Amino acid sequence: MLGFQAMSSSPFGAVKIPIGIQAKLPVEILATIRTVVEQVDMPIEIIRIIKQDPAAQQWILKSRGKQWIVDAETLKWILNNRNKKWVLDENLTKWTFDSQTMKWIIK
Amino acid sequence: MSVVNTDLAIYTSANMPEGNTTIAGGDINSGIRASYDDPSSPNQIVVYSSSASDTSQSLTLFGRTAAGIDINESLSLNGTVNVTTSSIYERILKANLSDVAVGVITVSGNSVNKIADIPIGESGFRRPFYDATASADVTKTYYEKIFVKNNNTTSALTEAKVIPVNSGLASKIEFGLENNKKADQSISNREAVPTGIAGGFGSGSSGIVDSELLAGDYQGIWCKLSLEAGESAINSFYEIQISGTTV
């Protein structure tokens, strides 16, 4: 007598299915650019430094044919030379050239 | 229930530094994913929810303009209605929800590609190696930790492997698997060398510990970014495959 036997599902249930994801993680690298500063000669001479203590330096400025003036509002020394503008900060530790802050370097 | 693609996710660790002096690594942060796309071209960003109920949260978006300027905005969600940034973003750095949402939050470029979906119960996404900067003079090496997690609640991913894809920054990033799953090792800063990676760092296929990710299981992956002196700036990606089998 012929009979019918149901197929077991277990052989198929044990089949493993390959699966996977591909994940993209954004990463940026920031570069460090060397700062290139154009050397600009500042047309002054320091003819005398009265240095009684480090916090109380006094500078006497002498320009080479150019006139330094004291700005009445900011009390900063300013020298306009053609299109260039130098400003001595009131604490006398830095100067700006065309609005860019630079450090004093005394050679 | 078989593991499906969406069950496998890449998450950040609890400590993802944005500089070189703070702690990196730790346990998984299952609320923040590390995988998403940048806009295909500089664009405004659109945010919306799949649920009209999401009106009390805000999404804070951090990115850069095409000129490299850091920008950020806080967008108040308006349910399923699009909320659009005022700024144009060339790249996205991170996005954080003020509170988890009822619906899926979609972050997309405006008329360009989708950035990411933030699943229900999660709070955002961010990129690894945030603000990582090459030196002009010396080589720099950074380490940060991400995790792969199996979010399936019943089934395991067997024969589980991590396979780096040879694209993007593959030549600059190697990875190492932590010796133990669910490990919470951290390093004092991202320039410190992590330990507990017996297999070391490399760029080849690597089997996950015990070759499986059980339901809810996760594996820590330390990534090592090596930068030459004078390296040029680049916005790119690191791509990995997670593969395995499931019943």
Image (cartoon, rainbow, N blue to C red):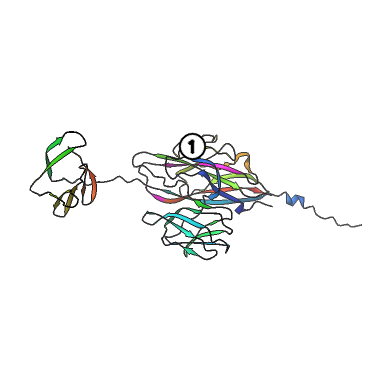
Report whether A86 appears left or right of B167: left
Residue B230 inside the magenta-drawn segment: yes
Q: Where is residue B118 in the image (x, y as percent from the top left)?
A: 55, 55
Report whether B156 appears left or right of B113: right
Q: What residue is rendered at 17% in x and 52% in y?
A: A85
Report whether B48 appears left or right of B64: right
Q: Position of residue B49 (x, y in %)?
A: 55, 61
Looking at the image, residue B85 lies above or below residue B193: below
Q: Which of A93 and B122 is in front in this view?
A: A93
> For mark 1, does the 10 Å Cα neighbourhood hold few (<14), some (14 to 19), or many (20 or more) residues?
some
Please identify the residue farthest to the front as the structure is shown: A73
Marked residue chain, label 1: B
- Where is the C terminus of chain A found, in terms of image quarters? top left
Quickly name the residue at label 1: B187
Q: Which of B164 and B216 is in front in this view?
A: B216
Q: Nearer the viewer, residue A64 or B230?
A: A64
Q: What stretch is highlighted in magenta?
A: B216-234
Residue A98 inside the magenta-drawn segment: no
Q: What element carries label 1?
A: strand
Amino acid on which the number 1 mark rests in the picture: Ile
